[in-house]
Image (tube, rainbow, N blue to C red):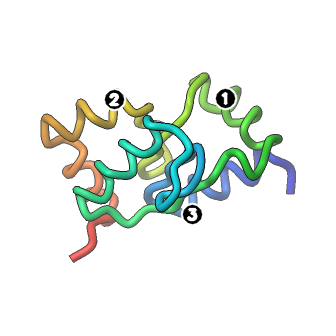
Amino acid sequence: MDVISRIKDQIENNPVVLYMKGTPDFPQCGFSGRSVQVLRACKADFMFVNIFEDPELREALKEYSNWPTYPQLYIKGQLVGGCDIILDLYNTGELVKLLQDAEAISA
């Protein structure tokens, strides 16, 4: 499976995907760490991809999404954005609504 097909598969088959630097337990940048904190505060179920483990995916995702930085959050197959957008949506309550619509909130 080529890298674009892998990206599409991840995004299409998981309601919430966070492409990040590091892992949720060991984020390797502040923006990724903050994004995980926000998703956890929302009690979101999400898949993560550590872009450092797959350099080919790291570069291809920038072109696929037309978004140059990480983290990148996808909900229901759509790019939501990076850390600043995630925080803004969280602060307005819109992030929880998006996650609820994706049926990605833990009880």
**Which of the marked residues, 1 or 2, is nearer the chain's N terminus?**
1
Report the residue marked by disc 1.
62
**Can you tell which mark lies on residue 7?**
none
Nearest to the eye among marks 2 and 3: give it.
2
Vertical order, 60 against 96 (above or below): above
Q: Which residue sits at x=31%, y=66%?
A: 103
Q: Amino acid at mark 1?
A: Lys
Report the residue marked by disc 3.
13
Horizontal side, residue 87 vs residue 78: left or right = left
Q: Using a 10 Å C-alpha cutoff, classify the residue at mark 3 as few (fewer than 14 neighbours), some (14 to 19) or many (20 or more).
A: few
Residue 84, x across and y down, in percent? 34, 27
Report the residue marked by disc 2.
85
The CA distance from mark 3 to mark 1 is 20 Å
Question: Farthest residue toward the right?
Answer: 1
Q: Using a 10 Å C-alpha cutoff, classify the residue at mark 2 as few (fewer than 14 neighbours), some (14 to 19) or many (20 or more).
A: some
Q: Secondary structure at mark 2?
A: helix
Residue 77, x across and y down, in percent? 50, 48
Residue 47, x across and y down, in percent? 51, 62
Q: Amino acid at mark 2?
A: Ile
**Which of the marked residues, 3 or 1, is nearer the chain's N terminus?**
3
The CA distance from mark 2 to mark 3 is 23 Å
Q: Amino acid at mark 3?
A: Asn
Horizontal side, residue 63 vs residue 17: left or right = right
Q: Looking at the rendering, which quadrant does residue 13 occupy?
A: bottom right
Name the image quarter holding the N terminus.
Answer: bottom right
